[in-house]
Amino acid sequence: MKWKEKWRSNMRTVTLRLRQNPYLSLTIIISLVGRSDVDTTSQWLAPIVWEGTFDLKMIDSIYKPQNITVATTIFALGKYTRFLKDLLESAEKHFLVGYRVHYYLFTDLPDQVPLVKLSEGRKLSVIKTESSNRWQEISLRRMERIEKLIEEKLLHKVDYMFSLDVDSKFYAHWGAESLADLVGVVHAWFFGSSTQQFPYERRPESQAYIPYDEGDYYYGGAVFGGRPEKVLKLVQTCRKNLDIDRANQIEALWQEESHLNKYFLYNKPTKLLSPEYLWDDIKKRRSFMKVVRFTQVVKNYAEIRPNH
Ligand code: UDP
Ligand code: MN
């Protein structure tokens, strides 16, 4: 065959393959163009993970042989147990597939934990937990409960961990590209806002206080993670500061999320996950969002929370 004919035939095959698999075309386009539309590193040179910035095959070839275990804490108190089924089923489809995952599920209603079939190497432990009549309290007390869990069960036993909000769902791949010493996720609603617009705690009386001329990102409280010893320092610091605030009868604007933001300002995450890893079902998809991996689902606040 002459080279011209061979070239034509090869191009026909490539065109056909791309037509059959639009996702492949998207991947190829992104890898050719790169991600010039978004920042892919922070100013302290931590990667910001976006679709098109990593080679999954290479990442898996690093982490798979290490046979790592990733602990995942989920709180489902009161009416929030209704989110468990969708969250766990979607996690089994998309979250660290092929890796050992141990879910630690905190609930006051163990009977309402749904039976979800877990893949090989994956486990779920239920931890009976007292509820509270204030949602703010339920949300912020996660810090001390995670602290205790790390000290008692995770330290030196698991390799990485994540804390996830239960009112959430996975829609696409979330894999080992998300792993690092200390991981935060850039909040979907404040991505691209100026630091002055971030809803940091601005009252100096709170331990979560951040002045208007400081700050670099606003992180979502629904996802954080890292190595257990690093996350232990984070939750310990936040818990202590929450205790001081409580003694001073002040509650930060966004409870533990405000304290998390304060911690990350002075103890920078070593990896940032883009809003692909924490989108919101009610938020219009933006052009920089090539994929939505994990979102907060729509909920009726007045109906589901113990107080409103
Ligand atoms: N939560 C819970 N029961 C409640 C309130 C909160 O289990 O009654 C837990 C649950 O894990 C939830 C997290 O606290 O995902 C954070 O609360 P929420 O999702 O209501 O806060 P938002 O994401 O709306 O700011
Ligand atoms: Mn939530």
Image (spheres, rainbow, N blue to C red):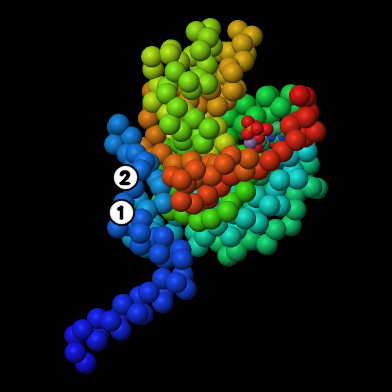
Contact flag, marks 2 and 1 (Cβ < 8 Å):
yes
Which of 139 and 233 lies nearest the eye of the viewer? 139
Res 75 quadrant in image: top right
Query: Mark 1 belongs to which amino acid?
Result: Val
Residue 3 visible in image: yes
Query: Where's ligand 1: which quadrant?
Result: top right
Task: Name the spot of residue 304 as percent of width and height, x first.
Answer: 77, 34
- Residue that carries the numbered disc 2 in the rendered image: 36
- Residue that carries the numbered disc 1 in the rendered image: 33
- Check the image and report above or below for 171 versus 134: below
In this rendering, position of residue 3 left or right of residue 307: left
Q: Residue at x 79, y 47 (%)?
A: 112
Task: Name the spot of residue 251 as percent of width and height, x first.
Answer: 62, 15
Q: Residue at x 57, y 41 (%)?
A: 284
State the mark number for residue 299. Answer: none
- Check the image and report above or below for 164 versus 189: below
